[in-house]
Image (cartoon, rainbow, N blue to C red):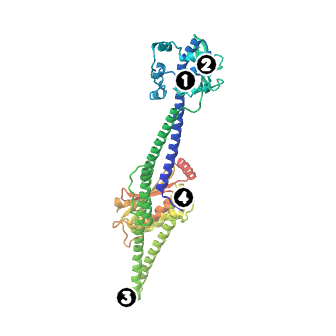
Amino acid sequence: MIRLNLSFKFFIAFLATSLAIVVVMVVAMQLYAYRNFSDYIHKVEAIRLSELSPILSREYKADNGWERLRENPQRWRELLRPRGSAAYTEKPPSMPSGFESYLKPIPAPPPPPPRERRDDGLRDSQDRRPPPDEQDTERRPPRDDRDRPPAERPAFGIEHRLTLFDEQKAPVAGGAESTADHTLQEIAVDGKTVGWLGLRNEETPSDPLDMAFLKQQARAFYIVGALMLALAAVVAFLLARHLLAPVRELIKGTRSLTSRRFDMRINVTTSDELGQLAEDFNQMAQTLQQYEQLRQQWISDIAHELRTPLSILRGEIEALQDGIRAASAERLESLHSEVVHMSKIVSNLHDLSLAESAALHFKREPVNLLRAVRACLQKFQSMFDERGIALVDELGDRETITIPGDKDRLTQVFSNILENTLCYTDCPGSLTVRQLCTASEVLLQFADTLPGVPHESLPRLFDRLYRVDPSRSREQGGSGLGLSICKTIIEAHNGTIKARNAATGGLLVEIMLPLKNKAHKHARKDTDGNAT
C-alpha cells in the first residue's frame, strides 16, 4: 500500500478543488457567452428585418401588390441581396464595434467588358433593346427556381430563413409555408399593413462566421482555464509547503520528546492556529523538562535523605560489633531515632505517591474545623512550652464552622505546620493562629516569629524535599516532604495553601477551605443570634 505524505495529500485536495472550480467557471462562462452572443445575433437579425421592410414596401407600392414576387423568385433574391446600398454598407446605429466585417454585404461583381460593335446601326438597335428583365418576361415565362444555376452566397447569411407573407399571412416568397416559429416584421404602405417579413427562428447559430466566433471564444476559455489551473497548482504547491512546514517541525519535536530530549523547541513564525500549536508544544516541552529536572532532583534528595540515617545506623552498629562502643540506652535511643526518621520519610513518600496517583483515600464528612485545630494545638502545647514558643489562639468562639472533608488528613496538615514551627522558629518566639470566615470559605492563618524565609524561596516551600538552607534547616536534617503533603491534602479538599512573610518577621501560612452551604447557613444563623 502506497503511503502519501500530508503535503502531497494537501496538494492533491487543493488541486482537485481548483480543477472543479475552473471547470465550473469555464462552463458557466461559455454558456454565458453563447447566450449573450445568441441574443446579439437575434438583435442583428432584427435590425436586418427592419432594413428590408422599407425595400419591400417600395416593391409593393411599385407593383401595386405581391404578384411579381410570387411569379419571379429571382426578383425576391435580388431584393434580399442589394448591391452597394448605403443602408447596408454603413454601420447600423446599435451595432457593437468589432462586428462590421461580419455584416458587410458581398460587393457586386465587376461589369463585363463591352463588346465591339460593327456599326452605328447595330449599336442603335442594341441600345433600343429592352432591359434583360423585360426581355425575359416578354419572350419566355418565368423559369422555375430549380432550373436556375446556384446563386452566389447571400450578403448577410439569413436569406435562406426569410419568407414574405401577405397581409393574410399567406406565403408569397420564400421557403416557409406558415408563420410558425418565425419572427415577423410588419410591412406597411401608407399606414396600412400589406404584408409580413418572417425570419425562421434557430436555436443555434448556423452562420459559419458565427460558429467560428463561438469556437474562438470557447478556445479562449479553455486556454484561460488551463492557465488558471496551472496557477492553482503552483499556489497549491507553495501553500502546502508553507502550511505544513510547522507540522514537520512538530513531528521532529515530538520524536525528540520520545527520545527524552526535552530541550527541543520549535521556532514560532506565525500567529495562526499552527503558531499557537507550536507555542503549546514549546510550553509542553518546557513543562516536561522541568518535571524531568524535578524527578532527577527528587531521586537525588531521596537518596541523600536515606543515605544519612543509614550511614549513622551502619556506623553505630559496626562500632557496637567491634567493641569500640559499649551498648547502652543512649546508643540504642540514637539508633531508634534514626529508624523512626527513615520510617517517617518512607511514610511521607508513600502518602505523596498515593495522593498524586489519586489512590489516597479521603473521607467526605462534616468536620468542625476550629475544634480540630484546637485539638491539634493542645497536643503540641507541651512541646511548644519546652521550646519556649508561645501558642496564641485567636480562633474565636465560633464552634459551628463546618466543612466537608477528612478530619484525620486535615489534622495531619495542622500537625505538619506546627512541627515546622517547632523545628525552625527561634526561642523565645510565638505562633499565632487565627481564622477569618466569609460567606463561602474560611481562612486559617499560622504566623510564627523569626527567622523569616528569603523572598525567592517562598514559591518553592511546597516543593518536594525542598529546604531553605541554612536559616531554616534542622540540626539533623528534615525530610522536606511535610509541606508538600500539606499542599496535596488541601488541594484534595478544593482549597489552597500558600506562604508569605509575616509582619512578625517569621513565616505566615494561609489555608483557604470552602464551606458547605448547609453549614454556612447554620453558621450565619449562629452569628446573628450571638453577634460573634
Position above or below: 122 against 284? above
Residue at 40% over, 86% down: 318
Label 3 sits on what residue type?
A: Ile
User: On the picture, is 194 further left or further right than 155?
Assistant: right
Label 4 sits on what residue type?
A: Asn
Instruction: Determine the CA span between mark 2 and mark 3.
Output: 164 Å
How would you rate the neighbour count of disc 3 (Cα within 10 Å): few for under 14, some for 14-19, many for 20 or more?
few
User: On the picture, is 97 further left or further right than 456?
Assistant: right
Residues at badges 4 and 3 in contact (C-beta under 8 Å)?
no
Instruction: Determine the CA span between mark 2 and mark 1.
Output: 38 Å
Sequence-earlier tag: 3 or 1: 1
Disc 2 versus disc 3: nearer the observer: 2
Q: Nearer the viewer, residue 220 or 433?
A: 220
The residue under label 1 is 46
The residue under label 2 is 140
Residue at 51% over, 67% down: 354
At numbered mark 4, what does the secondary structure look like: helix, strand or loop?
A: strand
How would you rate the neighbour count of disc 2 (Cα within 10 Å): few for under 14, some for 14-19, many for 20 or more?
few
Label 1 sits on what residue type?
A: Ala
The circle on residue 368 is 4
Instruction: Determine the CA span between mark 4 and mark 3.
Output: 55 Å
Q: Is residue 498 visible?
A: no
The residue under label 3 is 324
Task: Look at the image and tell me in which quarter the N terminus lies.
Answer: bottom right
Sequence-earlier tag: 2 or 4: 2
Residues at badges 2 and 3 in contact (C-beta under 8 Å)?
no
Q: Nearer the viewer, residue 200 or 475?
A: 200
Label 2 sits on what residue type?
A: Arg
